[in-house]
Amino acid sequence: MSKKEIKALLDSILPDEQHNRVEVIQGKRGGYDLKNKARDTLQYYHRKGWITDSQNKAGERLWHDYRIAGIYCPRGMEIKESVSGSSAPSNGERQQEARQRVRKAWESISGEIGKSMVFNVCCYSMPLKGVTYDNYDNSKSRMARFREAMDDLVCYYA
């Protein structure tokens, strides 16, 4: 598939609000890869000094696991098993391991609102101000709760 065909496929599968959040780029080993522009929100918070280096790295790892787990991959782009006889783990095994890491990361974050904040920012690039959270009606209280949840994530990935 060409880069243009992959982008057309993504646009046909993803909801409208997600079209500009995924970019098709040239892969390191040939072929194409998906670049998640969702990390832009996380990077913005890091550049502003609102989150620490370790929180940023944990958010990056969460997004990486989320992508490998196939949760972010659109339908029709599932990861296929590698050729049998290979000594490296198959894509299916890597995907299963990544799903377990995502599940454990989810469980490591305290509170449903904290979980929602972390996954919205790290995996979907939804700024904290773009989502209404009960009892967190101003940006300072949301950012404080987000930092607490990211600290939980740092502890998991440490």
Image: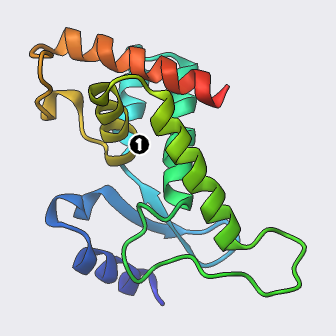
Q: On the rendered image, what quadrant is the C terminus found in? A: top right
Q: Position of residue 136 (x, y in %)?
A: 15, 16
* Amino acid bearing label 1: Arg
Please tell me which residue lies in front, 59 or 30.
59
Please tell me whether mark 1 sits on a helix, a strand or a loop: helix
Residue 127 appears left or right of 123? left
Please report the residue visible at 57 percent of the width from the left and 40 percent of the height from the top: 61
Left or right: residue 61 versus residue 107 is: right
Q: In this orientation, which residue lies closer to the viewer: 152 or 128?
A: 152
Position above or below: 18 against 147: below
User: Which residue sits furthest bottom?
Assistant: 1
Residue drawn at x 15%, y 65% is: 16
Q: Report the residue marked by disc 1.
A: 39
Image mark count: 1
Q: Is residue 122 left or right of residue 70?
A: left
Q: Residues within 10 Å of mark 1 (few under 14, many from 20)?
A: many
- Quadrant of the rendered structure where residue 127 is? top left
For the point 82% across and 87% down, which residue is it?
84
Task: Say above or below: 48 vs 86.
Answer: above
21 over 113 or under it: above or below? below
| Quadrant housing residue 130 | top left
Q: Position of residue 153 (x, y in %)?
A: 52, 27
Name the residue located 26 percent from the left edge and 27 percent from the top edge.
Answer: 113
